[in-house]
Structure formats: C-alpha cells, structure tokens
Image (cartoon, rainbow, N blue to C red):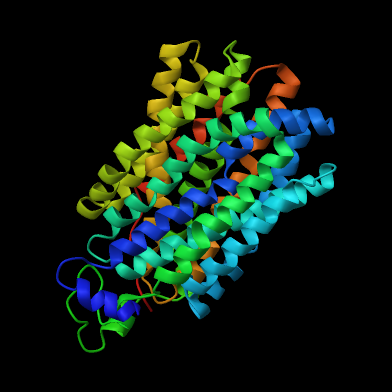
Amino acid sequence: MLNGIIRTLSGRYFYGWTMVGIAIGALFISGAGQSHTFSVFLGPISEALGLSQTALAGAYGLATFAAAFCLPYMGRLTDRFGPRRMLLAITAALGAACFAFAGITGLASLALAFAALRFLGQGSLMLNSANLVSRWFDKRRGFALSLMGLGFAMSMAVHPPLLEWLISAVGWRQAWIWIGLSTWVLFLPLVYALVCDRPQALGLRPDGPAPAAPHGEAASLSGISRAQALRSSAFYIICAGLFTLSMLVTALHLFQVSIFTSHGLDAALAARVFPLSATTMVIAMPLVGMALDRFPTKWVFVSGQLMLCASLVSMVNVTGLASAITYAAIFGANNAFSMTLFAYVWPRYFGLAHLGSIQGTGQMVGVIGASVGALPLGMAFDAFGDYDTMLYTLTLLPAICIVLALFLRPPQAG
C-alpha cells in the first residue's frame, strides 16, 4: 500500500517530509518526559507528597542519570531493528509510564516514574526521531532536523498551560492519565501506517525522489564505528557541549516557575511564558538548520553556547512582564540551537553506518547532564533562598565549551 502511494506522489512530493512530520509528532508527545511538563507538576507533587525542592530535584536528577545509561542499548536496538519498530514500542511504553506516574505514593515510586518518562520521552523518542530523519536526508539534513524540533516547540507551547488548567480541573493524578491516553491515540496509528525506515526501501534516495543509485544504500550508511568515534577528540568536545546545553536547559525549564515566583511574579505568568519561548524557537529553528547546512558546524556550536549564557543572565534579571518576555525570546532561541544541534552533530561528524550506537552513547552523556542540572539550583534555593548567584556561576560552563569548540574537527576513519 505504501509503495503505491509513493509511486502516485513520485515527482511531486518527497516522502521524506512525511518522516519529518512523524518526527515532529514524536517530539510533541515526548513532552510527557520533558522538564517543561514536570515544571507545572512540581508544586502539586511537593504538596501532596510532602517533599522539599532538594528532594524533588534529587529524585529527578537521579532518575534521569539512571535512565541515561539505557540509551546506548537503545541506540544498538535502533541500528538492529530500525526506528519504525522502536517508535512503536517506545510510544506504547510511554503511555503506560504516564499511567504509572498517576499512582506514585512516595519518593521511591516518584524516582522510578521519572526514570521511565525521561528514558522514553526525553531520550528514546528523540534518538529514534533524529535517526529516522537523518536516514532520509543528507544535503538538507540540518534544515530537516530543525523542522523536527518544531514538535518540541509545540510541546512547550501546549503542555504547560494546558496541564496547568487540567491540574486545576481534575487534579495532577488524573492529568497524567489524560497524557497517557493522548500519547497512544495521537501517535501510535501514525507510526504504524506511515513510517518507513529508509528511502532505499521505497526506491528513493536521501533528499529527493529519484531512484537510488547502484549500491546507494551502502553509500548512504557510510560512517565510522562506535569504537573509532570514542577514540576521536570530536566526540568528547561534542559531548562536553551537549552535556552543558542539556544540563542548563533542563534546569531552566524545570525551575522556570519557581524562579519567577522567587522574583515576585505569578506562577500562571511563568507557565504562560513557555508558549512565548516556543514561538521564538519555531522562528529560530529553521534559521539554525539552514546555518548548519551552510556554515562550519563549530561556529553554529559556539553560537549555541553564547545563547545559553544569555539565557542564564536574562533569567536572573526577570523582574516583570517586559523582562520575562525578553527572557522567553532568548531562551526560545537557545532551545532552537539545543534541539537542532543534539540531532545534527552525530551524523555530521560520524556518519550513518553506526549512528544509533554512537548517538545513543553521546545522548547518554547529554541526559546525564540533564540529570545533574536541577541539583545546583535546588540546593542553592534551599540553602540561600534564591537562585540568582548560582545562575550567574553556571555561565562558566558554556564559556569553557566555547573554547573547546574552537578545536572541533571531523574524525578520521581508520
């Protein structure tokens, strides 16, 4: 059936854009495991379970840390079975994890639920979506991956205010039931009906509808091995940058509501700022993607770290509506860099042949960064009653990554 549809559309529409649409949907439903969603639940969960900010941040961080070590295995499964099968399995498991979250009773069950949602939502869905899009695009990969990130922006725009309303209407436990049901209904049928792992299976090639050249599949899957990647300096420079981005973006997402309220602003305003960041992200992501296709990757990488510094500083200076909007715009642009770079750098530097295992290992490092991001801010607030000094201190991390990025070079096979 799918082959017949492709033959009908051939010459007028490249089916790879359908894969981009699927990836957008995947990143949208990944909101169930993203920090901007958890941000609106922290207050109700803290009150219901009697947990401090440090306890919540510790559970969140430990769970994310544990989930990170499963990602290399997920990458190997993706290389073996393909993103279609894995997306089906991950989506089914993600919905079930949402139902489990509704039944948490204490710190231990909260940590387990956090771990499941972070592994499936933040980690596995993004890994497989990026893998799928990277198989379908080559010369336009940066632009295609930047469009994929629109799903994350849509989640930022929709999930916090919607869930803020849903929590007030039915309570936080019932809200998780609705998240799980919508995950299954919105995404499972699309993956089953539409996803194809690679263009060669439909007589296509990456970037366009022309028939694949002889041995095109082997050529499209060229690249170095995971062992070779781990021996290259590029792998560790990229990991350092993505660790920092993941760590600090997670911290800002998770504590946005708390930081705003500590500055005397309303929690509802803090939740409504998420859509403003998402709007800026939507505008900026195609620009970041086109920059990656056109300019040296390391300079786009540096720009992302500079934007992260600006996000931290602007958050400290949020004191009213105008400064909140300024922060939202800067942070949205920062998210555009973060989402696009996370997906782009692995095929750019290491190829497609072992993309899943390399990306899984690298993304493990990024998720470890996310796991520790919440702790400095949670501990600073519990110890000193504010977040600002710690936010300023954390700007040192992206500054170090800017220096490292100057030495970023593609690894040599062999």
Q: In which quarter of the image is the N terminus?
A: bottom left
Is 353 on the left or on the right of 199, as rendered?
A: right
Report the residue at 28% width, 45% height from top.
286
Q: Position of residue 354 (x, y in %)?
A: 44, 75
Q: Position of residue 17 (x, y in %)?
A: 29, 61
Quarter of image, res 173: top right
Residue 314 image position (x, y, % from top left): 45, 21
Nearest the viewer among 72 and 26 is 26
At horizontal 20% and vertical 65% (from top left) the residue drawn is 13
Judging depth in this view, the residue of 232 and 290 nearest the camera is: 290
Query: What residue is shown at x 73% (from left), y 48% (from top)?
Result: 101
Quadrant of the frame with the C terminus: bottom left
Q: Furthest-bottom residue in view?
A: 214
**Lateral position of residue 4 relative to residue 51, left or right:** left
> In the figure, is residue 27 to the left or right of 257?
left
Instruction: Work out whether 94 lies above or below 7.
Output: above
Task: Using the image as rendered, state which of residue 256 and residue 199 is in the foreground.
Answer: 199
x, y percentage for residue 357?
Answer: 51, 71
Report how many numbered discs are placed on residues in the image. 0
Name the residue at 36% across, 64% down.
19
Above or below, 356 relative to 362: below
Residue 219 found in image quarter:
bottom left
Tell me if residue 138 can be seen. Answer: yes
Residue lying furthest left: 11
Would you say residue 345 is visible in this rendering? no
